[in-house]
Amino acid sequence: MEKIIKDLAQEALSAARDAGADYADARFLRMKRQNLQTEDVRVSGISDSEEFGFGVRAIAKGAWGFAGSGIVTKQEVQKVARQAVAIAKASATAMKKPVSLVPEPKRVASFKTPYKIDPFTVGIDQKVGLLLEINRELLKNPGVKKAEGFMIFKKDERLFASSEGSFLESEVVTSAVGYQATAVGEGDAKVRTYYPPPMTKGYEHINAQDLLANAQRVADQAVQHLHARECEEGKKTLILDPQNLALTIHESVGHATELDRVLGYEESLAGRSFATPNHLNNLEYGSHEVSFVADNTLAHGLATHGFDDDGVEGQMWFIVNEGLFKGYSTSREVAGEIGWKRSTGGCRADHWGSIPIVRIPNLSLAPGKKPMSLDDLIHDVKDGILIEGRGSFSIDQMRCNFQFGGNAFWEVKDGKITQMLKNVTYQSMTTEFWNSCDAVADERFWVQDGIMNCGKGDPMQVSQMTHGASPARFRNITVRRGRA
């Protein structure tokens, strides 16, 4: 960022120290957002925005204080820094336990998403033109009554400075695109989607040829879905594709292993977690085939930002290793609560005016170690269902009991796909489900999918993270009929 902003960051730290802060950090953030939506042959929505502001955190008398502003001047920076310290001192009067941050080395560094084409330099007419062309292709199928598409682009330019001497800059660009076809008839409506994995890339991620090439298939399968047979209920073998697994990983592993939630910080809003510290290194979270790798250094990962809003660099670690529960996503504050010497770097805010909280990292199911394809997974199934894409979900406040749907369902009989099904949901408990996994396809089939709209906190914050996976197989899972 410009030198004047760097100077303002130092002003914020000086003002906080002078007001009595024991620790302070300043975070300046310039945010660009562009969201495009099309419906049938019209543009249904365009939003294009840019914001710039800053937030200051301070610890005084053992408590946190935070304040922010969209007015970026020397006087305002000093005022906001003093306000953050005043809030900390006021909070200390009701404090049960002083805040303590685990150590983090001083660091001066920069990070930039590797990208070729800045999406904000590409004309809106080109973007919506592609979305409308896709919609026209979808609507060529007479059974498709509605076609919808979207593109999302983000650019975050961030400067972080702390009273410990860290000075960090980053530029993160995110691009996402997708579309869906809705078939209507027989008193019902069914949707088929195509959502290529979102990534921290530039406009080069928007592959027009691939998007158009899949349009006819998506339209045909929407109609096929409408006329598909209801599933049979009971215990079945499931083969889940990477996009379906992304949401299941997110809800049953990602949120369950955010340490602030585990310690009760989220209890009043979204519950707690069964994965408490006494289970570390002794809970069989999944079968030996199951390893969950957290990796905030993952190339083009949605949570790959170089460093978090505690100033901790991106890292890679195990949440689950060959079935055994091994770790959490943490901040510098909560890591010390369980005796850890360093944070995993999972503290992020979604806006300059938001206080950083623990978020899910790039969290992926590791590919299988043995050569295994989707066809191999299917070949060994007598009675099962292949599930593709995302649908509805529900999970309890302890992240134990859950139900997930999907976007397309295929009956598997005696090792072969026989027909499409509809209204399939699967139900299980988290550790029971992941322990039922008996095979994961190898790295050739690993897909870097992700979540763009993870909500957490009060007030609500929205974040993004990657959940990669290869297709995986699960035995004896309860399947029910229900809106998926």
Image: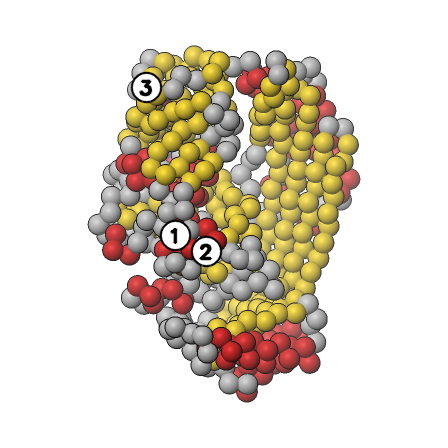
Task: Please state the horizontal and vertical placement of residue 472, each as a whole percent of the image.
Answer: 36, 31
Q: Which mark is residue 43?
A: none
Residue 210 x/y as whole percent = 60, 30
Earlier sequence position, callout 1 versus callout 3:
1
The residue tagged 1 is: 272
| Amino acid type for the residue under numbered disc 1 | Arg
When asked about the image quadrant of residue 349, the answer is bottom right
Give above or below for 407 relative to 337.
Answer: above
- Marker disc for residue 268: 2
Which element is circle 2 on?
helix
Residue visible at 46% across and 51% down in the picture: 270
Q: How far apart are labels 1 and 2 at the CA level?
A: 9 Å
Q: Quadrant of the N terminus?
A: bottom right
Say if 382 sits above or below 146 in the image. above
Which residue is located at x 76 percent, y 28 percent? Answer: 41
Residue marked by disc 3: 381
Label 3 secondary element: loop
Most foreground residue, 266 or 303: 266
How far across and down, in percent of the image, does residue 304 sit?
Answer: 49, 53
Q: Sort mark 2 into few (<14), some (14-19) or many (20+) by Cα contacts within 10 Å.
A: few
In percent of the image, x 60 and y 60: which residue is there? Answer: 351
